[in-house]
Amino acid sequence: MNKQTKLLLTVVITAVLLLAIAFLAGRLFPSRADRQGAEALTEYWAEDSVPAQELRAYVERVTDPGNAAEFIPEKDRIAVFDMDGTLTCETYYTYYDTMMFIEFCLHDHPERVSDELKEIAASIQPGYLADEALARNFARAYAGMTIEEFSQYAVEFGKKETASFHNMRYIDNFYLPMVEIVQYLYENGFTIYVISGTERTTTRAIVANSPISKYVTPNHVIGTDFEVKQKGHETESSNLNFKYEDGDELVLTGGFIQKNLNGNKSIYVEREIGQRPVLAFGNSGSDTSMMNYTIDSRNPYPAQAYMVVADDSEREWGTQNWEEKSADYISKGYIPISMKNDFLQIYQDGITRAEEQYTPAEVETEPEAEELLPAA
């Protein structure tokens, strides 16, 4: 074989190898365009899902630079998500922050809380009201904990299994179709915020240990706020009376600042983001202020709001009436999502609904703590 033939053969072999590598790279590492194409929102969404179709169409329109009338620059592609009931399961016995409070008071650290708080924790039953009064009690329970200690407890609690599902830890209660939406939007240049009624540090701990951790940074989490002070200055009326020094600790005082529900959601969005989102996702009336703020007629960009309806009573504990809820949401300008019909799969493989939703927790304190009055 002469030199020219050898050189030609080398070139051919090299070209074939490069083509093979390019092909495999495309299979193993699909391009952003490939990920955003026809396969978007199909892994966990029903093929005929109308909300999935509407969201895909919306994203295609607003990310197309050639569509001058609807194009949204990346810096303005803000999407806000409620957490409990929208990204995660919130049906009792699975509601993260409520069950964390119960476990903290009755099982994990009863020595750190008052008898009154133990009574309140033991009195919580299905159908309880997750209002500001209860959130104030949550704040009291964790008084004296540093932010790091509190965050770590939220993570450790997440490893416990809920009695409402088989093979589900509390941190496993993310809805896979909603996780898919978060990823899809992130890959299309959207900045994702989680706007939750759950306390902020707890929400950050949940998000950081969840399937959406790659797409939502801690500074993009907005939640209910408990009072925080510098250790040693907990009782001082003004933070202007002291300064942070190297090694100082920030601690929860037991005080309460604000519950991030209803009108506070729109106020927090304006205060902390500083502009209207273009997409909002929620699941209940407490999210409607955030939804309405997003789709307000003064929004300079096309905007949409989606509401998750908990109507799946077989794979989930949903009891909402689809016809009633969807009609109500449509009348308000929202796009309803049916967990029963739109979600192809809700949870990770192996997670199934338990036979009973609620299993009473045993109180590991004084015997009389079992006979309790309702929380105030």
Image: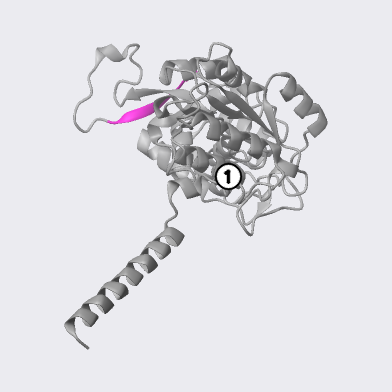
Q: Which residue is more in the foreground, 43 or 369?
A: 43
Per the image, label 1 sits on a secondary structure element best described as: loop
Q: 35 above or below 25?
A: above
Quadrant assignment, res 323: top right
* Viewport quadrant of the C terminus: top right
Quadrant assignment, res 76: top left
- The residue located at (60%, 35%) in the rendering is 57
Residue 107 in picture, x, y percent from top left: 55, 45
Q: Which residue is more in the foreground, 315 or 326?
A: 326
Query: Which secondary structure type mostly characterizes the magenta part of the structure?
Result: strand
Residue 205 in picture, x, y percent from top left: 44, 40
Please state if 61 lies on the left or on the right of 14 as rendered.
right
Q: 220 above or below 35?
A: above
Please state if 264 lies on the left or on the right of 251 as rendered.
right
- The residue located at (55%, 43%) in the rendering is 179
- Identity of the amino acid at label 1? Phe
- The residue located at (59%, 18%) in the rendering is 295
Q: Which residues are magenta?
A: 249-257
Q: Which residue is more in the foreground, 226 or 41?
A: 41
* Viewport quadrant of the N terminus: bottom left
